[in-house]
Image (cartoon, grey):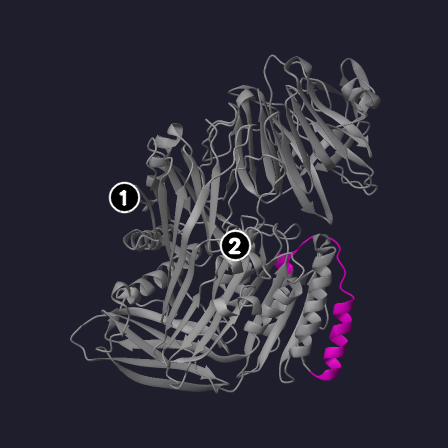
């Protein structure tokens, strides 16, 4: 039976679309009500999204529910109600959730529920089969602590229903005990043509924002189309700050202390900017970096001192010492910035250590020192082991000042930057490769531009289970938040003490808060303070866990897991199991991990079946599509065994080996590193020898890489015109499966489906005929029948290129092509003073050479015997050239 698909995307995107078998039916579905209710108390926001959808067809339909939520939020509740019966999501430990999912995966549709979709958003998605002429209600709750940046809190509501909804309501209630100092509405939905749909009401401690657009307005407004609303509503506000000791709120045995003193003198800062200028920064990245730096330099105060370091494989200093931000020095620095150009590799270790030395050479009492690193990639030269780099930086800084790491783009090792920042009292921030990247850079700097306090310690009497209560710096426009549990409910007041350094002078704040001061909140939100404490505690424990090892790490992990389960938060340690009514279907929602998933959604073209996942989402699958697509469940890549050219000395390098499903090819493809760079160098492991053979193929060619005509399997590759590596690789299997991989995208076609994606999207597809495709951040594993091949995307040394690694083909195969030679052998005819090898009973002149192994992202150097192509392949290169790939 044909089934329509209703996709309801709430809060950010409500999209209704349909896919079916070749005969398409008209949909008859209706979102008859959609509510967003958000309550903010003491900056803690609880948002409930409720959508009611009716199936008006005389047959069942599968209805998709998609909702975008803030990345900092934790989902805490999900419920589907069908025919008066409710189905609740349950938060479990990841392993338990995975086990339940695995038991149910073969019984129906299952898909990843949460993925990262933007700078500040991630997407929750599920579906349910709704009977004819029936209704379903979806309800999702998420919670977040709003963070103060640049003097304001932001609550974002993004609505694109793609359908005019009769009963469409957004209600926001903000309650702040000290009073609301200002409240503004911005965004696409805050326009003149929707002015009468938005109503704002203010009182001393409360504000209400409602948005009730009519169906006519939903179709006719500026940011609308024929399908309805399309835009966001951004609510920004701040609170009154009359008490320099901060604001203490108490409720039901818990407290929160918001400390954001104003009127303090700014502290002069010593700031060093460490800028990556490696080849991968080419183009817009380096242009936007220069533009941001020029603006930032203009904003420095005259009593600030600053330094500039650029780095690739070498370090370049603007000046050896920090200089005062005088007009003359700033003009000279701007000239230096304008001449920053991209080149070379990436030596992060040497650059950061040089920045530390620069600050240490400029000690000043009463100042705040800051290191800011901007990079777009992994360390590729000098010290490249990230653990050793972190150790070196940690020992050099000695907790004396913070290191802030800005990761530019999608290919940066964000986990590494995050951990290095946390170890040194800083934070990591991703800078997205968009047209406003320069503004993102400047925006981050603005957050740390005006330090007001250093070495802040917050002490309390009569409390326990405190969240973090010591901080290195407090910046203007930010806020320090501490929460805890009141030890003795009979105590009438809590004593607070804040000790800090203000421009070289010690300052102390004392206060006492009556514990009976219960916040006047709605009954359904009476436990908000306890949940605020739990939210903040879990967030900080997750950060702390990154920095620990051994038993300490396990103890912190267990405590974070315990709280996540108690309060039903979907965190990196837990999953939400959603059990659906039809045939025991189970879905698992895992929280995405920042830095691993592209923000870009799948690119659609034609009739697609795309299964998008995240690194934390272990299982992905879909229903059959015309009998072609079947369930796939993988927690690790399909192919565990593979041959890797050893980076060890030649006499210890290993030959090829066999796998469980067939012969694993005994050669790897590596890359030429000679000065000319006009050829690709291929390497071939030899039977009985520790030193592999290698040979060169001149650019530019379209090559037959691997072919087995008896199995209808072909791989062709197009090398780049002036640079090493491949610009395009194509797979063809049984005439119906065609996969094209370029440095920009991945395109799969068969007689039923089209899939188009960008690099950086993680997904898994499984088809009949033994076709499996699995991508990670910069690699795709391709299985077609008995063949397994990985294609790696490299971005280093100023280039972007593909490199294939054949992992497996059948034992009884007789393949041809560049990769088809697997049973080569040789003997040494003469020694190193006049090296000659005997290959297939023929003496061949050889040269001791080296290559980089580009079947690994670390690209280790490997030595090999370089011999002519014809002698090792026993054919002319013209036999391997194709006209089309």
Residue 860 visible, this orientation = no
Say whether residue 817 is left or right of residue 36.
right
- For disc 2, the marked residue is 160
Residue 339 within the magenta-colored segment of the rendering: yes
Give neighbour class at mark 2: few <14, some 14-19, many 20+ (Cα, 10 Å). Answer: many
Residue 391 in picture, x, y percent from top left: 52, 57
Give neighbour class at mark 1: few <14, some 14-19, many 20+ (Cα, 10 Å). Answer: few
The kind of secondary structure element at disc 2 is: loop
Q: Which of marks 1 and 2 is nearer the N terminus?
A: 1
Residue 399 in picture, x, y percent from top left: 48, 68
Q: What secondary structure is the magenta-colored segment mainly?
A: helix
CA–CA distance between discs 1 and 2? 28 Å
Q: Which disc is residue 542 wearing?
A: none
Give the quadrant of residue 257.
Answer: bottom left
Above or below: residue 833 compared with residue 160: above
Above or below: residue 33 compared with residue 662: below
In depth, the one of 692 and 585 nearer the eye is: 585
> Quick check: marks 1 and 2 in contact, CB under 8 Å?
no
In depth, the one of 363 and 118 nearer the eye is: 118
Q: What residue is drawn where x is 51% and y is 78%?
A: 476
Residue 130 in picture, x, y percent from top left: 38, 37
Residue 630 in picture, x, y percent from top left: 48, 27
The kind of secondary structure element at disc 1 is: loop
Q: Which residue lies furthest to the front in this view?
A: 216
Residue 447 visible, this orientation = yes
In depth, the one of 35 and 69 nearer the eye is: 35
- For disc 1, the marked residue is 84
Residue 332 within the magenta-colored segment of the rendering: yes
* Residue segment shown in magenta: 326-350
Q: What residue is drawn where x is 61% and y is 41%?
A: 604
């Amino acid at each position: 039976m044909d089934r329509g698909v209703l996709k309801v995307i709430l809060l950010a995107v409500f999209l209704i679309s349909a896919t079916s078998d070749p005969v398409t039916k008209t949909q008859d579905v209706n979102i008859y009500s959609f509510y967003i209710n958000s309550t903010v108390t003491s900056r803690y926001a609880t948002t409930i999204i409720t959508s009611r959808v009716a199936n008006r067809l005389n047959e069942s339909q599968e209805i998709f529910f998609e909702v975008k939520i803030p990345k900092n939020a934790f989902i805490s509740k999900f419920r589907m109600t069908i025919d008066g019966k409710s189905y609740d999501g349950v938060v479990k430990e990841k392993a338990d959730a995975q086990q339940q999912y695995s038991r149910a995966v073969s019984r129906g549709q299952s898909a990843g529920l949460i993925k990262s979709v933007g700078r500040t958003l991630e997407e929750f998605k599920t579906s349910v089969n709704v009977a004819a002429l029936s209704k379903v209600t979806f309800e999702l709750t998420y919670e977040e602590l709003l963070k103060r940046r640049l003097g304001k809190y932001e609550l974002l509501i993004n609505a694109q229903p793609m359908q005019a909804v009769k009963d469409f309501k957004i209600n926001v209630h903000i309650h702040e005990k000290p009073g609301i100092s200002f409240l503004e509405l911005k965004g696409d939905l805050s326009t003149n043509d929707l002015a009468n749909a938005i109503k704002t009401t203010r009182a001393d401690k409360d504000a209400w924002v409602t948005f009730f657009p009519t169906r006519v307005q939903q179709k006719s407004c500026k940011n609308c189309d024929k399908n309805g609303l399309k835009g966001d509503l951004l609510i920004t506000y701040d609170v009154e700050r009359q008490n320099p000791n901060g604001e203490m709120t108490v409720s039901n045995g818990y407290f929160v202390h918001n400390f954001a003193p104003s009127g303090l003198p700014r502290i002069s800062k010593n700031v060093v900017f460490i800028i990556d200028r490696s080849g991968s920064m080419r183009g817009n990245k380096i242009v936007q970096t220069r533009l941001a730096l020029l603006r930032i330099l203009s904003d420095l105060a005259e009593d600030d001192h600053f330094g500039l370091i650029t780095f690739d494989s070498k370090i370049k200093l603007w000046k050896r010492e920090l200089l005062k931000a005088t007009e003359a020095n700033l003009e000279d620095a701007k000239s230096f910035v304008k001449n920053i150009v991209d080149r070379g590799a990436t030596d992060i270790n040497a650059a950061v250590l040089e920045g530390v030395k620069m600050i240490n050479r400029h000690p000043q009492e009463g100042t705040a020192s800051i290191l800011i690193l901007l990079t777009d990639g992994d360390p590729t030269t000098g010290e490249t082991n990230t653990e050793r780099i972190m150790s070196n930086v940690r020992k050099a800084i000695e907790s004396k000042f913070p290191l802030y790491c800005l990761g530019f783009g999608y290919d940066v090792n964000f986990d590494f930057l995050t951990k290095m920042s946390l170890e040194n009292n800083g934070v990591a921030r991703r800078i997205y490769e968009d047209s406003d990247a320069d503004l993102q850079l400047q925006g981050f700097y603005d957050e740390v531009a005006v330090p007001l306090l250093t070495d802040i310690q917050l002490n309390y009497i009569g409390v326990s289970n405190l969240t973090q209560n010591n901080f290195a710096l407090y910046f203007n426009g930010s806020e320090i938040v501490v929460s805890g549990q009141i030890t003795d409910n009979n105590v009438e007041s809590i004593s607070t003490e804040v000790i800090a350094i203000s421009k070289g002078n010690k300052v102390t704040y004392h206060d006492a808060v009556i514990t009976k001061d219960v916040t006047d909140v709605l009954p359904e939100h009476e436990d908000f303070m306890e949940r605020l404490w739990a939210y903040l505690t879990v967030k900080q424990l997750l950060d702390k866990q990154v920095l620990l090892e051994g038993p300490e790490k396990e103890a912190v992990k267990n405590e974070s897991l315990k709280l996540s389960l108690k309060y039903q938060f979907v965190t990196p340690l837990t999953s939400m199991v959603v059990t659906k009514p039809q045939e025991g279907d189970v879905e698992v929602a895992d929280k995405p991990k920042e830095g691993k998933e592209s923000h870009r959604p799948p690119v659609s073209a034609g009739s697609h079946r795309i299964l998008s996942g995240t690194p934390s989402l272990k299982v992905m699958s879909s229903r059959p599509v015309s009998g072609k697509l079947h369930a796939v469940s993988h927690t690790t890549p399909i192919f565990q065994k593979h041959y890797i050219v050893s980076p060890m000395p030649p006499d210890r390098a290993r030959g090829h080996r066999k796998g469980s499903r067939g012969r694993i090819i005994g050669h790897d493809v590596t890359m030429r590193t000679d000065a000319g760079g006009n050829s690709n160098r291929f390497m071939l492991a030899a039977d009985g020898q520790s030193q592999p053979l290698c040979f060169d193929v001149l650019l530019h060619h379209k090559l037959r890489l691997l072919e087995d005509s008896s199995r209808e399997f072909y791989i062709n590759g197009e090398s780049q015109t002036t640079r090493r590596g491949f610009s395009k690789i194509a797979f063809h299997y049984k005439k119906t499966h065609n996969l094209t991989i370029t440095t920009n995208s991945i395109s799969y076609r068969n007689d039923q489906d089209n899939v188009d994606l960008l690099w950086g999207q993680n997904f898994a597809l499984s088809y009949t005929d033994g076709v499996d495709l699995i991508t990670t951040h910069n690699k795709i594993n391709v299985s077609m029948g008995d063949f397994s091949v990985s294609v790696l995307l490299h971005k280093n040394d100023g280039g972007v290129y593909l490199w294939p690694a054949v992992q497996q083909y059948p034992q009884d195969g007789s393949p041809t092509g560049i990769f088809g030679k697997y049973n080569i052998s040789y003997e040494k005819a003469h020694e190193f003073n006049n090296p000659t090898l005997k290959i297939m009973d023929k003496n061949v002149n050889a040269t001791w050479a080296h290559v980089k192994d580009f079947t690994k992202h670390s690209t280790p150097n490997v030595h090999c015997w370089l011999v002519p192509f014809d002698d090792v392949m026993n054919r002319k290169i013209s036999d391997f050239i194709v006209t089309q790939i």
